[in-house]
Amino acid sequence: MEVDGRCLCGQITYVAVIDPDRVAICHCSDCQINSGSAFGVVAAVVEGRFTLKTGRLAEYRKIAESGRVRVLSFCPDCGTRIHAHTPGDPAAFFGLRAGTINQRAALTPRLQVWCQSALPWTADMTAIPARAQQGD
């Protein structure tokens, strides 16, 4: 599936080919901290088919919970995380942040990973009252 997307400020834009059957919710503590939320949602980029159209990504290298070196790429102005990959390993998971994809409403996660780190309340969010907007 061909997608396009951007960062919050619009400096970074891209096109990519993703596998819509490989959209995952990641509960690892790195995703929790980096997203500022309970989990991250990522889509698998197919065979490195990610093309930066505008802007220049900043990078941060870290050792993930898996023990792999992961390069986290983000907008240097607004800080939006765009993707993560393992350098020098084209077969490793290249995860595009689903929230940056313009077609994100068409993507349904098919898997949850690192569930050992999941926050307990994420198991049933239907029990939490919901509003259409913040002020409702």
Image (spheres, rainbow, N blue to C red):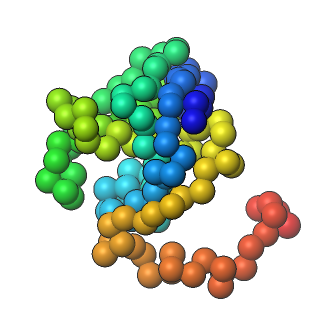
Q: Nearer the viewer, residue 122 or 42?
A: 42
- Could you tell me which residue is drawn at 21 percent across and 58 percent down? 65
Q: Is residue 78 above or below residue 110?
A: above
Q: How far from the left and from the top, in percent, is residue 90?
A: 25, 32
Drawn side of residue 103 relative to residue 14, left or right:
right
Q: Nearer the viewer, residue 1 or 77?
A: 1
Q: Residue furthest bottom?
A: 127
Q: Is residue 99 visible?
A: yes
Q: How far from the left and from the top, in percent, is residue 61?
A: 22, 37
Q: Is residue 102 above or below residue 40?
A: above
Q: How far from the left and from the top, in percent, is residue 32?
A: 39, 60
Q: Nearer the viewer, residue 27 or 108?
A: 108
Quadrant of the snapshot with the C terminus = bottom right
- Could you tell me which residue is drawn at 61 percent across and 50 percent down? 107
Q: How far from the left and from the top, in percent, is residue 67?
A: 14, 53
Q: Residue furthest top?
A: 54
Q: Is residue 39 visible?
A: no
- Could you tell me which residue is drawn at 44 percent across and 26 percent down? 50
Drawn side of residue 110 relative to residue 62, left or right:
right
Drawn side of residue 67 relative to residue 23, left or right:
left
Quadrant of the snapshot with the N terminus = top right
Drawn side of residue 1 relative to residue 63, left or right:
right
Q: Residue furthest left?
A: 67
